[in-house]
Image: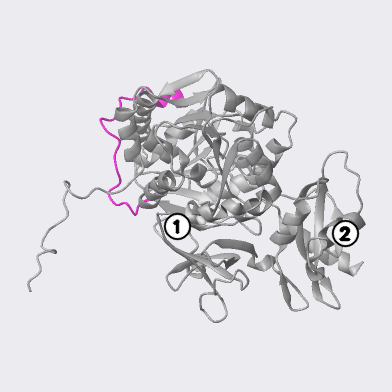
Amino acid sequence: MQQHFDVFDKGDANFVNLSPVSFLERAGDVYGDVIAVVHGEVRRTWKQTHQRTCRLSQGLSDLGVVKGTTISVLSENCPELLELHFAIPATGGVISTLNIRLEAESIAYILAHSDSQFVFVSEKMRPLLEKALSLSGALLRIIQIGGDDDDYSDLLLAEPVDRLSLPSDEWDAISLNYTSGTSGRPKGVIYHHRGAYLMALGTVAAWQISARPIYLSVVPMFHCNGWGHPWMLAIVGGTIVFSDTNHPEMLFDFMKRESVTHFGAAPVVLKMMAESEAVPAQPFEPRIKVMTAGAPPPPSVLEATDALGMDVMHVYGLTETYGHVSQCLPQETWAGLTPAETAERRSWQGVRFPMVEAIEVYDRQDGTKVPRDGQRQGEIAIRGNTVMKGYYKDPAATKEAFRNGYFWSGDGAVIHSDGYLQIRDRLKDVIISGGENVSSVEVEAVLYRHPAVAAAAVVAKPDDKWGEVPCAFVELCDDAEIDSEEIIAFCREQLPGFKTPKTVVFRDLPITSTGKIQKFHLRNLARKLDMQ
């Protein structure tokens, strides 16, 4: 029988390249009178934000920004950074948000490696940028946001474009994000318009966000473009409340004063809030929806935030996957679990987001999927539209990351019978003691239950008898007094002997500029302990 499905051509009427830029066009029309941004005394609607972005886009074009021009931004979260997330892509340029917690040497490297031609900088970050440029010798056009030397406002004097432009190809680069560089130089991760568009839509669906949420902006926009939330919130006409601090008392104040409904934060921020003296006397009502990522949240933290009136959803992802690609979606079958058991389940990495095609766990040695037994560990492999184009100017690393139709994460995990992922470790962090695999994450979760422990990290320490044994590095709460024997005894009550730390070291934990514990430093320290 003759088929008649393939005789039609794509045209302007039935095919449009996907780009999150279109979300702002719609927000200006549909949510024009809704407050889009709150920052100090500044309150602007979505219509005003759209109008400013149209002027900014033309101003950038007047400077010579064209398709493929990389523009770096070194700034705290602020309304101007939100506008740049739409204006730069609308010109065909590529936005590269820089981590403001990095030292000048790393900033200098990234500016040079990214081939940036322009750099936007906030007044507060100007000294850091000047130092970085003095190290690199790079010649870039500097555009300051705010302050006495404000250049940003000059761009807003341009005649506005009639409509923000979409890319000629949705595969075009939209942003260049650099990994946190826990070992070696950070790599430049390239996102495309299609992926950014689908990440935003997928988040709305998975987080079940209704119209006009009030979002407290805690996640830095240099983290995977704020987990894609700047683009996502335009879809639903959200109000973005910008905080200049992560201090718990200020966050609680914002939540009450602005009637916050949603926010995202790393587990360490949630822990600080749960332990703060500023904890509200009554739980939040209605409850606040929270997205957390970056590390498996200790079940104790999830229990504490639940009592505060926060519904915390743990998500998992990487810079290479535009941020979150899996979520720990609560199930009705969990209703009979104890609070501790529920918190344990909620710390898992869960199931894939709707815009992700597949997340599998493979045995690296034989190439087969691991059974759903919650025991056998493999490596997480991901495929879908929210996987990076590749690493900028690094074809070898790109080739290594993509194999057999998947992006390989480097994260070790198991799958439970219900299909839920649970990360056990970065593969290089697995401790093999006497032939048994020990998950550092599992041991860390136990350590976090001790009231004296503020932070903990577990790594392998060489051992003549067992090959490797767990070594715990512990950062104590203020005024806590405890010795290593008590910590080991506490762990022994809850863990098998081979998983119990054999050594405990009390010290401040080394962290990256994005708050990740630098375990490679701790592994080096553990090896030195073995030689003493």
The residue at the point 39 percent across, 57 percent down is 385
Which residue is disc 2 drawn over? 489
Foreground residue, 60 or 95? 95
The answer to whether 36 is drawn above or below residue 130 in the figure is above
* Image quarter in which the N terminus is found: bottom left
The residue at the point 45 percent across, 38 percent down is 230
Q: Which residues are magenta?
A: 153-173
* Image quarter in which the C terminus is found: bottom right
Amino acid type at circle 2 is: Ala
**Structural crowding at the residue carrying mark 1, measured as other residues with C-alpha within 10 Å and reported as few (<14), some (14–19) or many (≥20):** many
Main SS of the magenta segment? loop
Residue farthest to the front, as pictured: 336
The residue at the point 76 percent across, 50 percent down is 449
Foreground residue, 251 or 167? 251
The x, y position of residue 139, in whole percent, is 52, 41
The x, y position of residue 69, in whole percent, is 40, 45
- Of labels 2 and 1, earlier in sequence is 1
The x, y position of residue 510, in whole percent, is 75, 50
446 on left or right of 256: right
The answer to whether 158 is drawn above or below residue 522 in the figure is above
Amino acid type at circle 1 is: Met
Q: Which mark is residue 388?
A: 1
Which element carries disc 1, helix, strand or loop? Answer: loop
Is residue 172 part of the magenta span, yes or no?
yes
Which quadrant of the view contains residue 387? bottom left
The answer to whether 451 is drawn above or below residue 379 in the figure is above
Which element carries disc 2, helix, strand or loop? Answer: helix
282 on left or right of 356: right
The answer to whether 27 is drawn above or below residue 471 in the figure is above
The x, y position of residue 434, in whole percent, is 78, 78
